[in-house]
Image (spheres, rainbow, N blue to C red):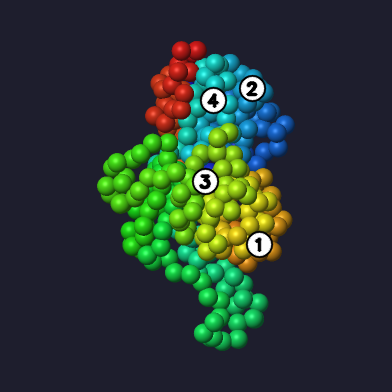
Amino acid sequence: MKDQKVYITRMIPERAIRLLEGHYSVGVNTEDRALRREELIDKVRGMHGVMSMLNDRIDDELMDAAGSQCRIFANYAVGFNNIDIPSASQRGIFISNTPDVLTDATADLAWTLLLAAARRVAEGDSTVRSGRFVGWSPLFMLGVEVTGKTLGIVGAGRIGQAVSRRASGFDMKILYTANNIKPDFEKKTGASFVGLNSLLELSDFVSLHVPLTPATYHLISEPEFRIMKKTAILINTSRGPVIDEKALAEALRAGQIRGAGLDVYEREPEVEKGLLDLDNAVLCPHLGSATLETRHRMGLMAAENILAALRGEIPPQCLNPEAVKNR
């Protein structure tokens, strides 16, 4: 099968690359940067399979460049808003993602951001490093407690539920919104289903776990910040455009909400300038799945999807099995 070619658009952990090299001719972008559009178009030409990243736009132009022999774009991410799935299906190209394997890592990071924002950890670190820490004081850098507060989960999928399970150690009340009521989740966590506005009004911490769709674009904007408690802290480990970043910066500066912890951004990697000088915003560089264990599992899962597709099978994590009808 060495006559079949696979391209990986960004360097990933070696185990997945070696797995693919055992079967195919494999090319990899070895530079530590995303490929420019014209480079990406050139690199996918003639490929039978492509392992793509969340910041690669997979559209008609790119799929046409890949050619009719291309069978799969395996996204190295759980999200897939970067891919035109209907167009892929029409061409008989499978699309896959990497669900489940990054759930715990992302949930852990959501809690990292929540605790850091609540206890002003980033601000405290900066204070110590800059030599501004002059000793303990009863009123110095007071944060807020997490234990016993109300956690609002917007989007109770795999990651949202994992975040909620971790809240049990803090004796938190859990509210959630979702496309439907989840009885098993409620039974395991004591969570209560409410509408978005009620969740925002009642929650001390709001954690976002929705996919990016037209319906969730700017889901949290100026009207929502007016509903939230002035003491609330907003966490986002989903997709940046779910929040109106400019409105968030204004809400934080005006004291409409207490704080925010962000791992993703509306125009990533660009960050709204109004956020950069705010002490009540904790900003991470998209680290949700960034553990050694998770990134290895993501690579192996994406590689297994490519192996299945090039064997003529429907990939295990296929998002469009209907594509088989157009092969």
In this view, the mark in front (4 or 3): 3
Could you give the CA–CA distance between mark 4 and mark 3, rounded to whole angstroms? 20 Å
Circle 3 — which element? loop
Amino acid type at circle 3 is Ser
Q: CA distance from mark 1 to mark 2?
A: 44 Å
Where disc 4 sits, the SS reads helix
**Residue bearing mark 1:** 254
State the residue at coordinates (57%, 30%).
83
**Percent x, y of residue 166:** 36, 56
* Residue 118 shown left or right of residue 164 in the figure: right
SS at circle 2: helix
* Label 3 sits on residue: 238
Residue 134 vertical position relative to residue 292 in the rendered view, above or below: below
Contact, mark 3 vs mark 2 (Cβ under 8 Å): no
Gap between marks 3 and 2, in whole Å?
26 Å
Q: Which residue is mark 4?
A: 85
Instruction: Identify the image quadrant of residue 172.
Output: bottom left
What residue is drawn where x is 55% and y is 35%? Answer: 215
